[in-house]
Image (cartoon, rainbow, N blue to C red):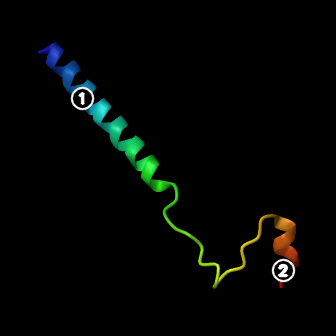
C-alpha cells in the first residue's frame, strides 16, 4: 500500500510538471501589437518625445 501511494504521488507530480512546462511554453507570445493603431518605441525616452 505504501508503494502505491508513492507511485500515485510521483505520477501526479510528473503530470503537474508536464502541464506547467506546456503552459509556460504556450503563454509567451500570445498577442502582437497592431502597429497601425499604436506607436511602437524601443526606449522610454523615445516614448516621451513621440506626439
Q: From the image, state whether disc 2 or disc 1 is nearer to you.
A: 2
Residue 45 position by quadrant: bottom right
Residue at 64%, 84% in the rendered image? 36
For the N terminus, the image quarter is: top left
Is 27 or 5 nearer to us in this picture? 27
Q: Is residue 11 above or below residue 35?
A: above
Residue 17 position by quadrant: top left
The label shown at residue 11 is 1
Query: What secondary structure is found at the residue carrying circle 2?
Result: loop
Is 37 or 4 nearer to us in this picture? 37
For the C terminus, the image quarter is: bottom right
Residue at 38%, 45% in the rendered image? 22
The label shown at residue 39 is none
Residue 24 place in picture, x, y as percent: 45, 47
* Left or right, residue 14 beside residue 24: left
Q: Is residue 19 above or below residue 49?
A: above
Label 2 environment density (alpha carbons within 10 Å; few <14, some 14–19, many ≥20): few
Residue 25 place in picture, x, y as percent: 45, 48
Residue 7 place in picture, x, y as percent: 20, 21
Q: Report which residue position mark 2 lands on.
A: 50
Query: What secondary structure is found at the residue carrying circle 1?
Result: helix
Residue 29 place in picture, x, y as percent: 52, 59
Amino acid at each position: 500500500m505504501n508503494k502505491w501511494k508513492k507511485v500515485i504521488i510521483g505520477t501526479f507530480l510528473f503530470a503537474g510538471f508536464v502541464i506547467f512546462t506546456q503552459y509556460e511554453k504556450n503563454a509567451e507570445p500570445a498577442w502582437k501589437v497592431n502597429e497601425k493603431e499604436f506607436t511602437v518605441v524601443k526606449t522610454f525616452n523615445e516614448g516621451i518625445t513621440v506626439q
